[in-house]
Amino acid sequence: MIEVGLPYEASHKMRDLIDDNYQLLMVISRFGIPLGFGNRTIAEICRDRNVDCDTFLAVANYISGKAFDRNPIDLKSMMEYLQSAHRYFLDFNLPDIRRKLIDAIDCSGADSAALLILKFFDEYVREVRRHMEYENSTVFDYVAQLLEGHPCGQFTISVFAAHHHSIASKLMELKDILIRHYPEKDDSNKLNAVLFDIISCEQDLTSHCAVEDQLFVPAVAIAEENLRQLSDDSCDDSEIQPQDDKQDDGKLDSLSLREKEIIVYIAKGLSTKEIADKLCISAHTVATHRRNINEKLDIHSSAGLAIFAVINQLVSLEEVK
């Protein structure tokens, strides 16, 4: 048994980690460690599977909220772990949620909000894919070159860190829309099941991004500093720019009549200026109403507001653009 609060150590049995925190099943899997541990220790299993034990312990301890040491992290093992997580989200987890979402909501056309919800989810998945493919190519390629002693360009890990953000917020918004606004059904078991999966995925993505920020980025920064101290070799002037992931810019009775009008126009695809012209008010006033709407509904994207408008019968699906 692992004593409460104490960090995991190489001498602990691997099976005790799961007893202590079942979420570490995902960590173990992403390091390429299969089940069937027996009574073997973390050190023994990591050695047998060619996994860097210090890196494994740093990730496991961090995710479990325990004291961790980032200094001995092996960047090659860390990148393999992160790439495995990317494959899990893109190839299994998000497609599985989509299948369950289609099964839980009526996408036949009878439920006009359902198609918008599915579109919202698909756009989110594309955003996640862009985010992770950028890391797989640009960032991890840079680190691989760094480990070989000759990174090229003016890209540094600080460029990545400055633009890195959690990719779970839009999934949280979809969860809130479904929980707070989706019409009650006679059989809610399927919807509740997919909501559970969405919440679990949201937590997993948040944890994944935190590992990148708190473990991966500092380890790369240390490698950069070590290389600077060892060599003054110059690189070419080509510059790799980070990809800007697109980010999209509740209760009905809390909204004023004017706010409802603005939501309708947003759902119909009108710009702030066009809405201002329609209502004979200034664009600044429209923007102020929009901020108030966002705060009241906790919905911060036009797609989310369109779903809200359809669910609450402010507009029909045919009117949405």
Image (cartoon, rainbow, N blue to C red):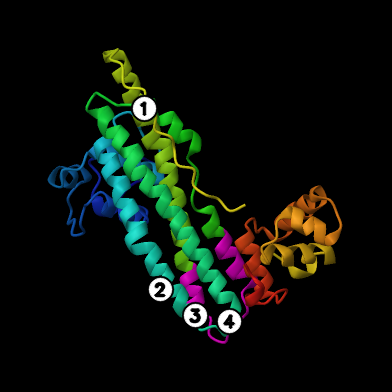
The local crowd at label 4, few if under 14, some if 14 to 19, many if 20 or more residues have their Cα within 10 Å, is: some
- Judge from the rendering whether residue 92 lies leftward or rightward of residue 45; answer left or right: right
Which residue carries the number 4 mark? 111
Mark 1–mark 3 contact, CB under 8 Å? no
Label 1: few (<14), some (14–19) or many (≥20) C-alpha neighbours in 10 Å: few
Q: Amino acid at mark 3?
A: Asn
User: Can you identify the residue that label 2 sits on?
Assistant: 99
Rendered residue at 81%/61% (across/down) = 278
- For the residues marked 1 and 3, what is the alpha-carbon distance in whole angstroms? 54 Å
Q: In this rendering, which labeled residue sits more in front, label 4 or label 1?
A: 1
3D distance between C-alphas at marks 4 and 1: 51 Å
Quadrant in the rendering for residue 43: top left
Q: Disc 2 vs disc 1: which is toward the camera?
A: 1
Closer to us: 251 or 304: 304
Q: Residue at x 39, y 33 (%)?
A: 240
Quick one: label 2, few (<14), some, or many (20+) residues within 10 Å? few
Disc with the residue nearer the chain's start (2 vs 3): 2
Left or right of 236? Residue 185 is right
Question: Circle 1 sits on which residue?
Answer: 238
Give the secondary structure at mark 3: helix
Between 319 and 39, the one lying in front of the other is 319
Farthest residue in the left direction? 48
The tag earlier along the polypeptide, 3 or 4, is 4
Question: Looking at the picture, which amino acid does disc 1 mark?
Answer: Ser
Q: Which residues are magenta?
A: 173-195
Q: Nearer the viewer, mark 2 or mark 4?
A: 4
Distance of label 3 from label 4 (alpha carbons): 18 Å
Q: In which quadrant is the C terminus drawn?
A: bottom right
Kind of residue indicated by mark 4? Asp
Q: Is residue 240 magenta?
A: no
